[in-house]
Image (cartoon, rainbow, N blue to C red):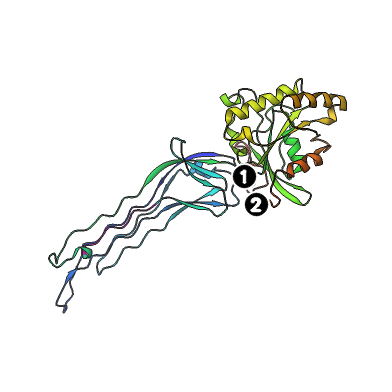
Amino acid sequence: MHFLDQAKIYIRSGAGGPGAVSFRREKYVEYGGPDGGNGGRGGDVIFKAVHGLNTLIDFRYSQHFKARRGEHGMGKDRTGKGAEDLIIEVPVGTQILSDDKEEVLADMVEEGQTVTLLEGGLGGRGNASYKTSTNRAPRQHQPGEPGQELWVWLRLKLLADAGLVGLPNAGKSTFINQVSNAQAKVGDYAFTTLVPKLGVVSHKGREFVLADIPGLIEGAADGAGIGDRFLGHIERCRVLIHLVDITGSDPAEAMRIVEDELEAYGAGLEGKPRIVALNKLDLADEELFQGFAKELKEAGADKVFPISGATGAGIPELLDALLSYLPHKTTTEHPGNEVESEGEEKEWSPL
């Protein structure tokens, strides 16, 4: 299954069916008259958030969605059948944006949530409805209202309680593998992580979802590296964990680069609570940690946690602090497995 978090699609609701022009003509019936029925209503276009999806890849291969039109009216005052609504299933966390991406038309944040984006056209009136005392044989009828049409963007923002940020090679993939059920790729080179990944963390009887996104570099807001397109997946997080590599030459500068990119991106990320951690403690000593921790505090960190994603040292204390930012009752209904890149094929799973 490939990972795709943006897609543009065309949607159109169904037109109403036309009313009928018909006259009653029966042998041995003395009086006739108009008996054309009304047309049926066209189908609505409805979006529904469903569990088990974590990508928009289906919309790459199917981009046009059209609801059926209502059936036409018939004689003997028979109303045409209304068309079934067109239900488009999307992952929980999907936003529906206008064609210019300036307006959020709907935000699908709960499983089972439905939004009627386009309504079907009303059916037209048949000639029986035009009968009056002075117009006994009307031939007027309505063709039915046309459907509505729209180009929209779908943008997926994965739902997670906490998010990981940091420079490439800060150890985010190793960390999420250590604390959750994720199986993120780990490598000794930059941009090992190419797409966001989710993992479910269990700590002291509580569970929450942790998101890992590709590393940020200076100028990411302007498109450098992978850019900042995946930051949308941590917009809904309650708290961010900022991992800083203790083996780097200047951890304070590394923290500043990432914080500047978050501020440049905006969308509320700059104001979210932070937990700063100096990672790869297994490759440094206490004296080096104390020196770098002092620099990070001078650069704006409230508290600095010493951790090692490889050995697990210091992680329980960090998770204790993390729980204080999360509601006591959390759910695990978010997909817990990693999402795959477009170049990787794996056996499909509902999660």
Quadrant of residue 241 within the rendered picture: top right
Q: Earlier in the sequence, mark 1 or mark 2?
A: 1
Q: How many marks?
A: 2
Task: Inspect the image, locate mark 1, and give the three-letter code of the amino acid beneath it.
Answer: Leu
Q: Position of residue 211 (x, y in %)?
A: 67, 40
Quarter that holds the N terminus: top right
Residue 126 belongs to magenta span: yes
The dot on residue 159 is 1
Highlighted magenta segment, given as a residue range: 119-127
- Element marked by disc 2: loop
Foreground residue among 96 and 318: 318
Q: Which residue is mark 2?
A: 333
Q: Position of residue 183 (x, y in %)?
A: 72, 41
Foreground residue among 115 and 323: 323
Left or right side of 175 for 134: left
| Residue that extends furthest to the left in the rendered view of this protein | 134
Q: Is residue 247 visible?
A: no
Q: Position of residue 259 (x, y in %)?
A: 66, 28
Q: Specify few, some or many for label 1: CA neighbours under 10 Å numbering under 14, 14-19, or 20 or more.
A: many
Q: Specify few, some or many for label 2: CA neighbours under 10 Å numbering under 14, 14-19, or 20 or more.
A: some
- Element marked by disc 1: loop
Left or right side of 142 for 65: right
Q: CA distance from mark 1 to mark 2?
A: 10 Å
Left or right side of 255 for 151: left
Q: Residue at x 29, y 67 (%)?
A: 78
